[in-house]
Image: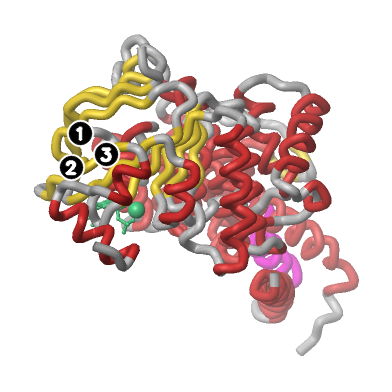
Amino acid sequence: MDFSFLGDYKYFFINGTRITIMLAFFAVLFGIMIGIILAMLKISHNKILRAIASSYIEFIRGTPLLVQLFIIYYGLPYLGIQFPDFPLFGQNIGDFMAGVIAMSINSGAYVAEIFRAGIQAVDKGQMEAARSLGMPYLMAMKKIILPQAFKNILPALGNEFIVVIKESAIVSIIGIHDLMYNADTVRGNTYKPFAPLIVAALIYFVVTFTLSKFVGLLEKRMDTA
Amino acid sequence: MSMIEISDLNKYFGKLHVLKGIDLKVETGEVVVVIGPSGSGKSTLLRCLNRLEEPSSGDIVFEGLSILDDENNDINKLRQKMGMVFQQFNLFNHMDVMENITLAPIKLKNLKQAEAVSVARDLLDKVGLLEKEKAYPAQLSGGQQQRIAIARALAMSPDVMLFDEPTSALDPEMVGDVLKVMKDLAAEGMTMIIVTHEMSFARDVADRVLIMDEGIIIEEGNPQKIFNQPEHPRAKDFLSRVLGIF
Ligand SMILES: Nc1ncnc2c1ncn2[C@@H]1O[C@H](COP(=O)(O)OP(=O)(O)OP(=O)(O)O)[C@@H](O)[C@H]1O
Ligand SMILES: [Mg+2]
């Protein structure tokens, strides 16, 4: 197979990888925020709040990411919410935002379950000790429970980051210049239908494999700690 | 007015009736020791006092304020005045000793960091662990953790200290250090309610001993009376088992 196109087109892959990683990073970051809130609702004593969180989680997990992406990308402007329209990092910021929003809404549902399990794994004596000192519930959550839960679920969040990187290839459909989109562009420009995809696959693999090794190290360090 | 006035306190766990109309008054400076068989409701009673368990009915008035009256009283404020020490210590695992002790005073009483640290050092000195301020809970023995937990509770300058079997999870050789700290506290006039199986401690330190059985207080009085002339047959039964007398 001939990879000589890399000379002319390597920046397509480099820039695409950058966009993919940035997108996944922001998606997981906002996904964590959504996930924490959902997890808190899920463990609250209020039935209605629990029902809201459960519905969200079930709905997101029960519908394809592609549909969610289209609902955000086409649906929000239809409802009168316009995404900004100017370039940033060689990428239309509005499209990028739509991708990040859809991916975080999706990731949030999965992160919620990770956090719920993490919070419930913290010994309940920790909450009781905090409350007995007079800390309000949310302060005890923030200062005592979440930091310990966070530490325990760091590997799971690392895995979620890996999942999001892989699934993010789908945003190429709405024209975000991520790794997948740029690989496709190279195919069109070079009339090589196959080789650019191999390059993209290798890059995805190297990124996720490196991350999963990193997660493995994290897990090991926590076992010994 | 007594510091704590419990009236007709009932607690159900589902159908299980765990506290059956408890009436109890605790005076300022008094040391009350609660003993009784396993499952008799001692922990539940203590935990109702600061509402870690929600009472099913009845009232608990602390320093003239009902802890159940959320309309007028802030339970979080009331809890600041009631220190609690747990069987399992429950130190915050992700914080070192100094952070464990200073977190609540800084966050809840708006103490300056430096003030809180200086208060904490006094308390660490008092419990004999001044050199441990940088240690994490996992690096401490059970007895050390429990003394830190006592210091953490004291850092809020509570008016009453609640102890739920503070030495039950400790290796025997650690028990003495913790009991000594508690004795010192009692000698300083701290109001204390202590659930314990340490009968000699009860005898030495308690102003009043309560025996609980199946959700009621079956016997109460000063230690001499309780340990020498218990009246209730079940009290005799219990004491004969734990003391090997009668
Ligand atoms: N959260 C709970 N849910 C259901 N039942 C409970 C709960 N906590 C306690 N109980 C039950 O209530 C009863 C009293 O328990 P409690 O812990 O107050 O007893 P105790 O006197 O402290 O016993 P021990 O000496 O073993 O600590 C027991 O039958 C116990 O099983
Ligand atoms: Mg108990």
Give the labeled residue for mark 1.
B22
Circle 2 residues within 10 Å: few <14, some 14–19, many ≥20: many
Residue A65, image x, y percentages: 43, 56
Q: Position of residue A78 (x, y in %)?
A: 42, 30
Residue type at mark 3 is Glu
Viewer-side label of 2, 3: 3
Question: Who is closer to the viewer here, B119 or A193?
Answer: B119
Which of the pair A141/B202 is nearer the observer? B202
Q: Position of residue B127 (x, y in %)?
A: 70, 45
Q: What residue is rendered at 65% in x and 60% in y?
A: A181
Q: Is B195 above or below relative to B241?
A: above
Q: Main secondary structure of the magenta part?
A: helix
Residue that appears at 52% across and 39% down: A130
Question: Which residues make up the magenta segment?
Answer: A176-190
Residue located at (13% from left, 50% from top) = B16
Q: Secondary structure at mark 2?
A: strand
For the residues beneath circles 1 and 2, the answer to whether they share a chain is yes
Q: Is residue A23 magenta?
A: no
Determine which residue is flagged by label 2.
B216
The image's mark for residue B220 is 3
Relative vertical location of residue A162 with respect to residue B114 in this rendering, above or below: below
- Kindly give the residue lying farthest to the left in the view shown: B15
- Membership of A181 in magenta stretch: yes
